[in-house]
Amino acid sequence: MRAAVVERYGPPEVVRIMELPRPTPRAGEVLVRVTAAAVTSADARIRAARFPRGFGAMSRLIFGLRGPRQPVLGSAYSGVVTEVGSGVSRLAVGDAVCGMAGMKLGAHAEYLTVRADAVSLRPSTVTDDDAAGVLFGGSTALNYLRDRARLRPGETALVNGASGAVGTNAVQLARHFGAEVTALTSAPNAALIGELGAHRVIDYRQHAPEQITDRYDVVLDAVGNLSIAAGRRLLNHGGRLLLVVADLGQLLQARGNVMAGPAPETREDTDFLLALIGSSQLRVVHDSQFTLDDIAHAHRRVDTGRKVGNVIIRAR
Ligand SMILES: NC(=O)c1ccc[n+]([C@@H]2O[C@H](COP(=O)([O-])OP(=O)(O)OC[C@H]3O[C@@H](n4cnc5c(N)ncnc54)[C@H](OP(=O)(O)O)[C@@H]3O)[C@@H](O)[C@H]2O)c1
């Protein structure tokens, strides 16, 4: 099978298309032919070994010293089951599925094996691109807003970095949970973010977060330019600060109403997001699509830090 392989950390050019043996599903796993996969900010971080401050040494121990131990990156995928491992009864060959591959990664390839219990059935109302696109940012925004902040109807929320993969979902989910949403984004993206449901849009190039005088019940930072002190100043009494991007120092200080750390990937959350898309309550924003062969271009686009929503690669 063709796969995008990263042998050494580096710029987008280190990603090379190679022929690898097609994996075989073990007990409890299925083999999925990937039809669409996201190239996310996390994939680009791993490829470049560009980890948040303080995480460099620890991340290299986890992901690999000079290059990723799992050389095929990619987590969020949509595809079709082509083989079923022993002991799997809830999925069959031909099922349209999607999910997150977790630490095992491997979605930037024609095929990947995944644990059957981590796989969701993709409804026919959700496209491959939307399924692959929503999972990374959607499950993060969902975990932070619903599970950590317990955002309630009538509360106010500020989303910093509203046009990224996390931000486009955070704006819509905060609105879905009944919040009044203010979004920090740049002027070219303001109309889109308004369409996604933000009640108010602030151009961060005109007003830095520190200059905002309003106070919010929930502040979600998907950029990483808010200190804990600056974030706390934006909170109402009882407010919660969500540091989706946190350096090691912030992670160690995060407690009580300051929340940080990796968001879990669960099938229930995937199903929740798919249902919202299927009922037109959540829109997946797409920046660009590339073929697997052109994945270096996809990484280049993610590296700009300017992508709007999601970058998708398709197998063919
Ligand atoms: N904790 C977790 O589990 C978790 C999970 C997922 C992601 N993350 C982290 O969350 C961060 C965001 O991820 P992502 O995938 O959403 O990123 P992304 O899609 O690459 O974000 C790109 C967007 O950020 C906007 N942006 C850049 N600088 C900005 C600023 N100063 N103010 C406001 N917006 C700005 C850009 O808009 P403009 O062009 O308008 O600037 C662009 O649309 C990443 O650092 C990622 O590692 C953490």
Image (spheres, helix red, strand yellow):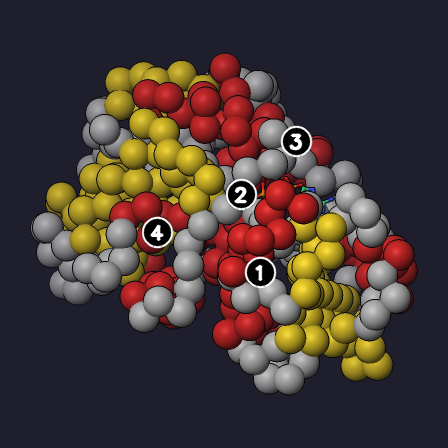
Q: Quadrant of residue 158?
A: bottom right
**Do labels 1 and 4 touch, CB within 8 Å?**
no
Mark in the foreground, 2 or 3 = 2
Mark 2: give few (<14), some (14-19) or many (20+) Cα within 10 Å: some
Within 8 Å of ligand 1, the CB of disc 4?
no
Question: Which of the image's four quarters has the C terminus?
Answer: top left
**Image location of residue 248, percent across then percent down:** 76, 47
Circle 3 residues within 10 Å: few <14, some 14–19, many ≥20: some
- Looking at numbered disc 4 in the image, what kind of residue is underneath it? Asp
Return the residue at label 4: 130
- Residue 308, numbered label: 2
- The first of marks 3 and 4 along the sequence is 3
Q: Earlier in the sequence, mark 3 or mark 1?
A: 3
Residue 270 vs 5, above or below: the answer is: below
The alpha-carbon separation of the residues under discs 2 and 3 comes to 20 Å
> In what quadrant does ligand 1 lie?
top right
Q: Is residue 39 above or below residue 120?
A: above
Of label 2 and label 4, which has the lower sequence position?
A: 4
Foreground mark, 1 or 2? Answer: 1
Q: Nearer the viewer, mark 1 or mark 4?
A: 1
Q: Amino acid at mark 2?
A: Val
